[in-house]
Amino acid sequence: MARRLRFNGTGSGVNGCPSLHEDLDTGEVIVHGPALTDPDDIARLRHLDKGEVPIVVPRELLVDFGPKEVVRVPDIIGLDEFDRLFTQFEHTAWRLETRRRYASDELTATYAQFTSGEPVDWHGIDAEWCAERREQTALGKRFERVRIVDDPPTTGQLYLLDNARRNSAVGERILNLSREDADRLGLPAEDFWIFDSRLVALLNFDDADNLVDVELITEPAAVLRYVMTRDAALHHAVPYEEFAARLAAQED
C-alpha cells in the first residue's frame, strides 16, 4: 500500500532539495537531499547499516518543517531481533531483574535438579549461549546484572542465585539487591537491558511470567532515567557470592 505523504517543506526555493515529507499514518519523516559521499566522512558514521544512505540536510530544515508534536509509538521487536542486540552493542550491556519468577527457567532440567534438592551441574548447559558470551567478553565488552531478591527469596530467585555461578564463569558480573532496598531507592518494577547507555530494551511479560516481546527505547531523556536506575542499583547491590553468604548466615 502506498504511503500517504504530506510535503512539509524545503530548505531551497529553487530546486526543492533538500525536502522533508511526513507519513500521515506512521508519523515517520522522509528526508531527501544530497547524499554524503566522501569516504572519510562515511567512515566516521556510527551504526550505518547496509542499504542505508546518509543524507545531508541543513539544521534549519528540521527546525522549520520537522513535526513539532511527536506522539511516541512503542518500538516493539521480536525475540530473534532482541537476541542480535547482544552481539551488536559495543561496550556495555546491563540488566535489571525484578521478577519473582521466570516461566522459562521452570522448563529446564537444571530447575528440576535444583527444586529436587540435587546439586546443579552447570557444565555444558546452554553451550551456544555460553560460547557467545565468552566471545563477546573476549572482545572487551562488559555484561552485568543486578537481580532483586525478596525476603524470604522465592524458589525462582534462589535458582538464579545458584545460576549466577554459570553466568559469572562466562564473563558476566552478577550482583544482588534486596527488594526492601530496591523499594527504598524507588527502582521501577521493570526488567530491562541497557546497551551502551544509549539503548534500552524493556522486557514485556505476560501474566504467566513468559517473555513475549521487547520494547526499544532510544529517546535520550527516557534512556537517562533508566541509566539513573542502573547507577542507583549498582551503588547498593553486592556481588552474588556475598549475598548468598548473607542468606546462608541467616539460616544458621
Image (cartoon, rainbow, N blue to C red):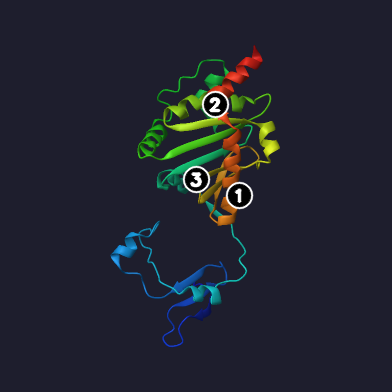
Relative placement, left or right, of 13 versus 243 is left
Mark earlier in primary sequence (1, 2): 1
In what element is the residue under mark 3? helix
- Name the residue that disc number 3 marks: 79
Q: Residues within 10 Å of mark 1 (few under 14, many from 20)?
A: few
The image quarter containing residue 123 is top left
Q: Position of residue 122 (x, y in %)?
A: 45, 23
- Asked if one can make out residue 103 in the rendered structure from this viewpoint, the answer is no
Instruction: Check residue 225 in the rendering and tell me which mark sits there, or answer none.
Output: 1
In what element is the residue under mark 2? helix
Q: Is residue 110 above or below residue 43?
A: above
Q: Position of residue 238 (x, y in %)?
A: 57, 29
Q: Position of residue 112 (x, y in %)?
A: 54, 22
The image quarter containing residue 247 is top right
Residues at discs 1 and 2 in contact (Cβ within 8 Å): no
Amino acid identity at mark 2: Tyr
